[in-house]
């Protein structure tokens, strides 16, 4: 390591990423940051393919654990890291050439404890591009805040000491563990920021079904997160308020449609709710339209289906939360 240069640790959790880990590590070993200023640690989360062998061929440190989830893999990597700063990138992501420099630059401010980068995609399919517009819209929302409360684990950075002192990622969460850690850190007064020029490229879901399944699962685990951080259910720096309104309107659509089947006058109420829902989609649909009119046309329908999927996830998550109260408690270790 270069004298006087703080060591940076890059932790890559990977599960069955044989086809993607090569691109991930190629990008990480070709950063604009001096190669001797950072170490790379791949944590193989119980892969059943050749992920470990592919990673070892790059001469980086590889740690193997039984399959315990990405949160546990990140914690293990951080515990074995040497850097004052620890960066996280998923094994199916490819870092931009200056990602490490862009991620670490905000830490020159001693008040900064965590940094989130941005996810992009090189895909050209309609649904992948739609999802990217959704991400970009949220990044615009987040960037309006000096201090944020969400650090995306696919492109994340923390002061390692603070991360470990605050318990790291909650290994009991299978989704939204990055949101829970971010909320926890923000509530404790740690400064989190967005670095818009810290880019990683990843593959988004390429079908509507996969996109909706992702929405369902994330909402399901968000229930646990909101149970611990109830004030975030009302507002956070990342989630548009229209998304929460749309979830309520989607439920209202179902109820008014059911009512209309037995009471004709309720059809007008159903139509009114539908028009209100459509109105909530216009701003985002217009943004999509400016990128591609086809995406703009499908945006209202996609938002409606996403509201149904998220709503179903919230219902299931609520039922599971009631049945497993142990998940309500905050992680203490």
Image (spheres, helix red, strand yellow):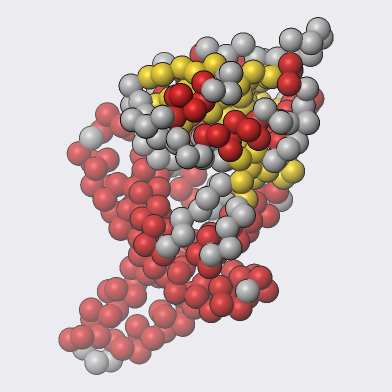
- Give how far across and how far down residue 46 sits, in percent: 35, 26
Can residue 59 be seen in the rendering of this structure? yes
Residue drawn 41% across the image and 64% down it: 208
Residue drawn 52% across the image and 50% down it: 203
Can residue 186 be seen in the rendering of this structure? no
Total numbered circles: 0
- Give how far across and how far down residue 177 sits, in percent: 44, 35
Query: In what quadrant of the picture does the C terminus appear?
Result: top left
Residue drawn 68% across the image and 55% down it: 140
- Which residue occupies the foreground of this view, 12 or 331? 12
**Residue projecting furthest to the bottom:** 264
Q: Is residue 320 above or below residue 139?
A: above
**Residue projecting furthest to the left:** 262
Q: Is residue 15 above or below residue 140?
A: above
Q: Is residue 46 left or right of residue 147?
A: left
Query: In what quadrant of the picture does the N terminus appear?
Result: top right
Residue drawn 51% across the image and 13% down it: 79
- Which residue occupies the foreground of this view, 127 or 60? 60
Q: Is residue 220 left or right of residue 99?
A: left
- Which residue occupies the foreground of this view, 161 or 147? 161
- Which residue occupies the foreground of this view, 203 or 234? 203
- Give how far across and how far down residue 255 sits, in percent: 27, 74
User: Where, by quadrant of the figure, is residue 94 drawn?
Assistant: top right
**Residue projecting furthest to the top:** 3
- Give how far across and how far down residue 38 sits, in percent: 69, 19
User: Where, by quadrant of the figure, is residue 198 drawn?
Assistant: top right
């Amino acid at each position: 390591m270069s004298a006087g240069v703080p060591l940076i640790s890059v932790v890559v959790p990977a599960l069955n990423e044989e086809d993607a880990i090569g691109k991930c590590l190629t990008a990480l070993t070709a950063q604009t940051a001096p190669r001797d200023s950072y170490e790379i640690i791949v944590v193989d989360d119980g892969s059943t393919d050749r992920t470990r062998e592919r990673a070892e061929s790059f001469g980086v440190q590889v740690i193997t654990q039984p399959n315990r989830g990405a949160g546990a893999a990140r914690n293990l990597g951080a515990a074995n890291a040497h850097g004052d700063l620890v960066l996280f990138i998923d094994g199916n992501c490819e870092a931009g050439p200056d990602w490490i420099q862009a991620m670490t630059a905000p830490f020159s401010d001693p008040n900064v404890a965590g940094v989130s980068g941005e996810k992009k995609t090189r895909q050209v399919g309609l649904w992948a591009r739609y999802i990217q517009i959704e991400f970009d819209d949220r990044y615009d929302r987040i960037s309006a805040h000096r201090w944020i409360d969400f650090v995306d684990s696919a492109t994340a950075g923390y002061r390692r000491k603070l991360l470990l002192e605050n318990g790291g990622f909650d290994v009991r969460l299978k989704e939204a563990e990055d949101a829970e850690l971010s909320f926890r850190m923000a509530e404790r007064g740690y400064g989190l920021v967005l670095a818009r020029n810290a880019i990683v490229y990843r593959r988004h879901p390429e079908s509507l079904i996969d996109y909706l399944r992702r929405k369902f699962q994330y909402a399901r685990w968000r229930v646990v997160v909101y149970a611990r951080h109830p004030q975030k259910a009302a507002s956070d720096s990342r989630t548009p308020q229209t998304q929460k309104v749309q979830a309520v309107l989607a439920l209202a659509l179902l109820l008014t449609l059911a009512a209309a089947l037995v009471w004709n006058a309720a059809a007008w109420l159903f139509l009114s709710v539908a028009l209100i829902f459509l109105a909530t989609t216009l701003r985002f649909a217009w943004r999509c339209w400016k990128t591609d009119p086809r995406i703009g046309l499908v945006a209202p329908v996609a938002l409606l289906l996403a509201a149904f999927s998220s709503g179903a996830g919230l219902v299931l998550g609520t039922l599971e939360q009631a049945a497993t109260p142990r998940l309500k408690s905050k992680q203490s270790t």
